[in-house]
Amino acid sequence: MDVAAEYDRQFRIWLERQGPSATDLAWRLDHLLWRQRVLLRRYPPADKRVLDFGCMDGVFTIALERAGGRSVGYDVSPAAIAQARAFRGSAETPVFTTEPPERGAFDLVFCCEVLEHMSDDHGFAGELVRYLGPGGRIVGTTPVGRSFWDPDHKREYDEASLRRALEPWGRVRLRRYYRTPLRNFIPVKQRGAAVFIFDVTPG
C-alpha cells in the first residue's frame, strides 16, 4: 500500500466532511479539540523543542508554537502538510515536513491519536523515543475502547493493553479523560467518549 497516498485520501475525505471551517485557521485554533486543550494545560511547551508526530494539517503544531514551543510538525500525508504550510503562511515556523525529523532533538514529542493506527504499536512507541533528547518525554492521546472509532484503527485500548505497548520504553503515566469536563472529577469509570492521555519518560 502507498501509505502517503492512502493518508492523502483520508485527509481529503476528512476535509470534505468538515466543511469550510476546516480551512479557517482562526476558527480551528479557537475550537481546538478538547483533548488538545488538555495537553496544552498539562504539558506546556514554552521554551521546549517540540515534535508533533502525525500532525495532519498542523493546527495543533501551530497552537504549540503560539504557546512558546519551538515546533516541528511531521506527517506522511503530503496533502495535509501542504495545508499546514498554507496555514503557516509566510512565517518561517513551525517547520512542517513529510521527512522524518532529526532524532534525539526534542524535549517533547506529541503523538495525538496516532498509536491506534499502527500495526506494531510497541515498535512505534520505541521509534518515538528515538526522537527525544536527554530528559525528554513522549505525550499522547488514544481513544478508550471504541471511542472515536475509525476504520483505519488497528485495535481498541484499555489501560492494560496500552501499558503493555508503552512500558518497555520508560515510566508510563495514564489518565482517562472524558469529553464533558465535569465528568473528569468523578473518580469512577463511566460510559461515553473518552481518551487516554499518556506520557512516557525513558530512563
Image: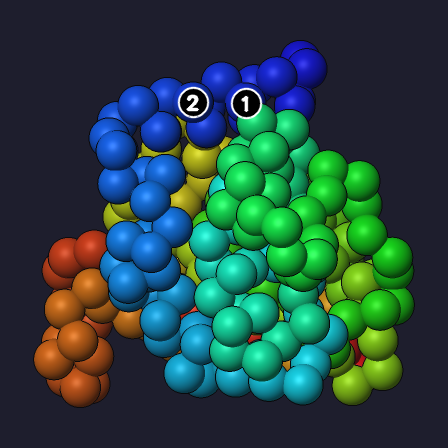
Q: Check disc 1 and report the residue beneath it.
A: 8
Q: In which quarter of the image is the N terminus?
A: top right
Answer yes or no: do the residues labelled 1 and 2 have beta carbons within 8 Å?
Answer: yes
How far apart in space, not on screen, are marks 1 and 2 (Cα)?
A: 6 Å
How is the model colour-coded?
A: rainbow
Residue 188 in the figure: left or right of residue 145: left
Crowding near the residue tagged with mark 1, few <14, some 14–19, many ≥20 C-alpha atoms within 10 Å: some
Tell me, yes or no, if residue 131 can be seen here. Answer: yes
Crowding near the residue tagged with mark 2, few <14, some 14–19, many ≥20 C-alpha atoms within 10 Å: few
Going by the numbered disc 2, the residue's amino acid type is Arg
Tell me, yes or no, if residue 144 can be seen here. Answer: no
| Residue at horizontal 33 percent and vertical 56 percent from the top | 26
Look at the numbered disc 1 and give the secondary structure of its residue: helix
User: Residue 163 in the image: x percent, y percent?
Assistant: 55, 66
| Residue at horizontal 78 percent and vertical 86 percent from the top | 135
Residue placed furthest toward the front? 90
Q: Check disc 2 and report the residue beneath it.
A: 12
Depth check: give the residue in front, 122 or 194.
194
| Residue at horizontal 44 percent and vertical 84 percent from the top | 42
Look at the numbered disc 2 and give the secondary structure of its residue: helix
User: Residue 122 in the image: x percent, y percent?
Assistant: 68, 52
Going by the numbered disc 1, the residue's amino acid type is Asp
User: Residue 69 in the image: x percent, y percent?
Assistant: 62, 76
Answer with the quarter of the image where residue 139 lies: bottom right
User: Residue 142 in the image: x percent, y percent?
Assistant: 44, 55
Depth check: give the residue in front, 166 or 26.
26
Depth check: give the residue in front, 75 or 3.
75
Depth check: give the residue in front, 119 or 84.
84
Q: In this view, does 172 lie above or below 141?
A: below
| Residue at horizontal 13 percent and vertical 60 percent from the top | 191
